Image (cartoon, rainbow, N blue to C red):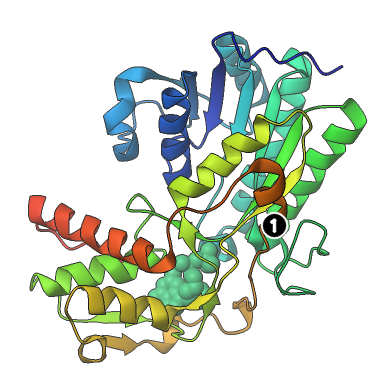
């Protein structure tokens, strides 16, 4: 069933969610590796800022993840060797506001894409963007590939469906289908509603006198954060293996929101206590997840993957990028 994989021929990849942080970083990696890159987008006319640097080097195909004939047409047009499914609602609180849309995109969308691949050519390799949210309230910590799933958020529940349907297709149809269980990862391309960008954008804006204060939720909340450019390399590596599999991609270390604040403001030469206020309405209460820490040992051993950036360097990189962006166009980023 699985076709031989000739690395000498020029390869094509199709990426859903290509306009997002991970999609655009992955597209750049694939271009560097010599791929022809196609992206599935909902509206090809939309302004994809993250794709500005590579717009002329990729082809965008308009298709909704729930439009099965459109997905088949996209696969027939691009004939990819590798398909990366990154499209989803990504901001977890939004999944409580739009649980049905979240399920349609993340759960049904993944199924629809797997079915379309099976219809067009089951030899295409498939990557499913799974997430640490599938562990929800974790039954052990740190988590690894066989930790039982216990999702809490609509996002996590939808991602569990996609995780298991990917494994079903791997087993039932012998597809080279892999799940990357990625922990929180950030970059200057992450949307500013996520806390690493929200904090570093504010630190830069306050430093330049464009903003006075920053409102945050729970400063003691902890996450295992890494650099998105390192993490998309893990996605690609999974599809270069002879056998498909599931892999945790994480730094293996958790830090608190307060640690992130102290590092970002300290690096910008500011005293965070003068600027940061806790807003109770931004706390997640019973929807908050704790103890999400990944053990990336399998990725290290089998994929040769390891994160290149330390947490401290990551925070510095984010602050530098925000300062640079503000110097070019002094508008503080709006935040959630
Ligand atoms: P998530 O892990 O995918 O939900 O990523 P986020 O960046 O949105 O949140 C990471 C952690 O930061 C969670 O534990 C949030 O509760 C916590 N947090 C604290 N204050 C804020 C805030 O003002 N905005 C966001 N987005 N998260 C916050």
Look at the numbered disc 1 and give the secondary structure of its residue: helix
For residue 285, which quarter of the picture?
bottom right
**Picture quarter with the N terminus:** top right
Q: Nearer the viewer, residue 43 or 130?
A: 130
**Picture quarter with the C terminus:** bottom left
Work out whether 300 lies above or below 245.
below
Work out whether 101 lies above or below 156.
above
Work out whether 200 lies above or below 159.
below
Q: Nearer the viewer, residue 205 or 180?
A: 180
For residue 133, which quarter of the picture?
bottom right
On the image, the x and y values in percent for residue 235 come to: 59, 40
In the displayed structure, does residue 166 sit left or right of residue 252?
right
Work out whether 220 lies above or below 60.
below
Q: Residue at x 49, y 86 (%)?
A: 220
Count neighbours of disc 1 (C-alpha within 10 A) and say few if under 14, some if 14 to 19, many if 20 or more. Answer: some
Which residue, given by chain and number where applicable, does mark 1 sit on? 297
On the image, the x and y values in percent for residue 296 come to: 66, 57
Which residue, as the protein is rendered here, is positioned at the far right?
172
């Amino acid at each position: 069933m699985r076709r031989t994989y000739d690395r000498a021929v020029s390869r094509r990849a199709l990426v859903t969610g290509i306009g997002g942080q991970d999609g655009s970083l992955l597209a750049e990696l694939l271009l560097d590796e010599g791929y022809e890159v196609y992206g599935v987008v909902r509206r090809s006319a939309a302004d994809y800022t993250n794709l500005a640097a590579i717009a002329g080097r990729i082809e965008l195909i308009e298709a909704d993840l729930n439009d099965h004939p459109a997905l088949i047409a996209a696969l027939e047009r691009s004939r990819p060797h590798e398909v990366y499914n990154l499209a989803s609602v990504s901001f977890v609180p939004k999944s409580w506001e739009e649980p049905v849309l979240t399920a349609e995109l993340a759960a049904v969308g993944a199924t629809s894409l797997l079915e379309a691949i099976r219809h067009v050519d089951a030899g295409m390799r498939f990557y499913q963007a799974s997430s640490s949210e599938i562990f929800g309230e974790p039954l052990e910590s740190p988590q690894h590939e066989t930790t039982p799933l216990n999702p809490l958020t609509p996002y996590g529940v939808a991602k569990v469906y996609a995780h298991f349907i990917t494994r079903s297709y791997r087993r039932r149809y012998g597809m080279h289908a892999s799940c990357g269980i990625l922990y929180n990862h950030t970059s200057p391309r992450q949307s500013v509603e996520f806390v690493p960008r929200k904090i570093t954008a504010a630190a830069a804006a306050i430093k330049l006198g464009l903003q006075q204060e920053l409102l945050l939720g729970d400063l003691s909340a902890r996450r295992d954060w890494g650099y998105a450019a390192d993490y998309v390399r893990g996605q690609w590596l999974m599809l270069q293996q002879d056998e498909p599999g599931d892999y945790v991609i994480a730094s293996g270390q958790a830090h608190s929101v307060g640690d992130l604040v102290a590092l970002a403001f300290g690096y910008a030469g500011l005293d965070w206590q003068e600027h940061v206020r806790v807003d109770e309405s931004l706390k997640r209460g019973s929807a908050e997840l704790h103890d999400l820490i990944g053990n990336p040992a399998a990725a290290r051993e089998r994929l040769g993957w390891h994160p290149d950036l330390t947490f401290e360097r990551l925070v510095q990189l984010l602050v530098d990028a925000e300062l640079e962006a503000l110097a070019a166009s002094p508008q503080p980023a709006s935040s959630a």
